[in-house]
Image: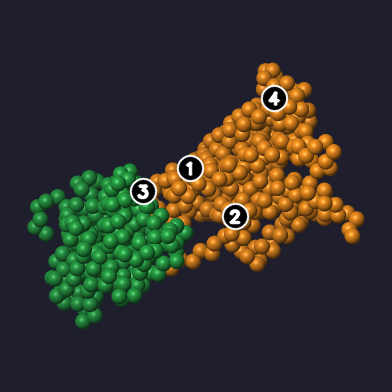
Chain colours: A green, B orange
Amino acid sequence: MSDSRVPLLSVQTLTAGYGSIEVLHGVSLEVHEGEIVSLIGGNGAGKSTSLSCISGVVPLRAGEVRFAGESLARVPAHAIVKRGLVQVPEGRKIFPRMTVLENLRMGAYTRNDRAGVESDLEEVYALFEILKDRSGQLGGTLSGGEQQMLAIGRALMSRPKLLMMDEPSMGIAPLLVAKIFHAVKSLRARGLTILLVEQNARAALKLADRGYVLETGRIVLAGTGAELLSDRRVQAAYLGE
Amino acid sequence: MFEWFDSDVLLQQLLLGLSNGMIIALIALGYTMVYGIIELINFAHGDLFMLGSFLALTLVGVAMNCGIVDPELMGASSHWWLLGTLVLVCGVFCGGLNLCIDHFAYKPLRRASKLSQLVAAIGVSFIIVNVGLFWGGLPMDILGGGGAAAAPKDFPHLVSDTNLLGEESFVVMTWNDVVIFVVTIPLMIALTLFVKFTKLGMAMRATAQHATAARLMGVDVNKVIAATFAIGGFLGGAASVLYANYNSTVSFQMGFRAGMDAFTAAVLGGIGSLPGAMLGGLLIGLVRAMSDQYVGSEWTNVVVFSLLVLILIFRPTGLLGLKQREKV
């Protein structure tokens, strides 16, 4: 990418794994301010591990993650959130025995500006109206799609600079998937930077400014969304053409 | 109809059961909070409770020796301020100690298997019991009871023994009963409000429900765990003063019995659930009192643990425990 600005997120030769298994063998990627970047790849390619590593939940073994120009080495996960780098985890991971409203308030855990939190709450409700109707309901009683909206809303409550989304379409009814992708688009329109991990490669690449293809822990392809969509290898492997 | 049935006896046992039940509930909260957040049965909790009562006894001795309170007046007049101070001091002592136990014994094992932490908890339990034995060997016999280290020691009534129901009443209710409710009920209400409405309380619930998600929301999970140990310990310390005052005796082994009762109460109510621990504590207290009277005290442990087994068979999550089913 010929962008000379300092990227908002820069990941250099990231290596990580679990126990004796190494999952990432030197992943490098960049996300610039205002972009939607999609990371696509098959099952077990290391997409989720990449995100968890960036957000500090999985320790990195080698390489470097820089956010807004600063290294995140030795910054614990909870402090990374405060800097504006927030992950919507795979499988939603909402708090099942807290109400929708409490879940959203947990999203604003690191913030102390009351007025800002209240106005952001209204914005999340405007984005996902169903959450307002369900605000007193326990998170665990929502449908999968509603939980995904709640997970996104909860992450937005921290007022992130960069939102990382892990498989927001996984296990969700197609109608709701469309709604969620629509919401992602509108978030970008408001200036939010997004790193999107998806198995639904077509939808993710259509939405993205740029994309990376991850295979068995390595980035094998990079390009703009349109370039990747028309790439024969991508079409064969991920678009079913 | 039944010769042995006497409504006065029943009332007396009910009162005894409720009073002891409230104390058990307070200890059970410490088990259930820690389990809820790190899935550890903190076997040392009952023994921590024992140490709290030893501190209380020592401080009462000091107060007597320094002439702050008159030994002659123990049980005759009420020393509310002394009781209040002891609840506070022993609470803080046990809370702080629990915090240290977590920091030095459990925290290094956080990423190890659950079994390692459990074994560590049993180890800490042994250590504390022996500290209690050593403490019991110190000259604490001013208050009567055995001078030997292992002997149970008498604990004086800090508040008046006068029967509040009148001298003629068969059922005896004194300020020693009342004080239990005066201390435990506000503590339980405060804990419930704290967990429901404060930021730290919300973080505790969030961590208990999904620790990774809580981290991703910016919660410093280690701090939340530390706070949980401190609060659970405080409640155990407060309970230790009430227990010693109510049952008039302390011994280095009392943590095991009380701990077993409280642990059973927590499981009965549904481990991880705060209202469950409160309900379970009351039930265990009542069942013990009824069984002591109507079955025979030698059978009480059998009754209590049979109840536990039955509950676990027919309702494995306890009375108020939630079945956790997560949608993926």
Give the secondary structure at mark 1. helix
Q: Residue at x 58, y 31 (%)?
A: B89
Please check whether the numbered discs 1 and 2 fall on a single chain: yes
Q: Mark 1 highlights which residue?
A: B226
The residue labelled by disc 3 is A109
Q: Are marks 4 and 2 in contact (CB under 8 Å)?
A: no
Check disc 4: other Cα within 10 Å, few if <14, some if 14-19, many if 20+. Answer: many
Asked if badge 3 and badge 1 are on a common chain, one would say no
Q: How far apart are the two marked residues, 3 and 4, measured between alpha carbons?
A: 47 Å
Can marks 4 and 1 be said to lie on one chain?
yes
Question: What mark, if any, has residue B268 been given in the picture?
Answer: none
Q: Secondary structure at mark 3?
A: loop
Identify the image quadrant of the N terminus of chain B.
Answer: bottom right
Residue A24, quarter of the rendered image: bottom left
Near-viewer residue (B66 or B123): B66
Q: In what quadrant of the picture does the C terminus of chain B appear?
A: bottom left
Q: What's the distance in space between the residues labelled 2 and 3, CA to CA?
A: 27 Å
Residue type, label 1:
Ala
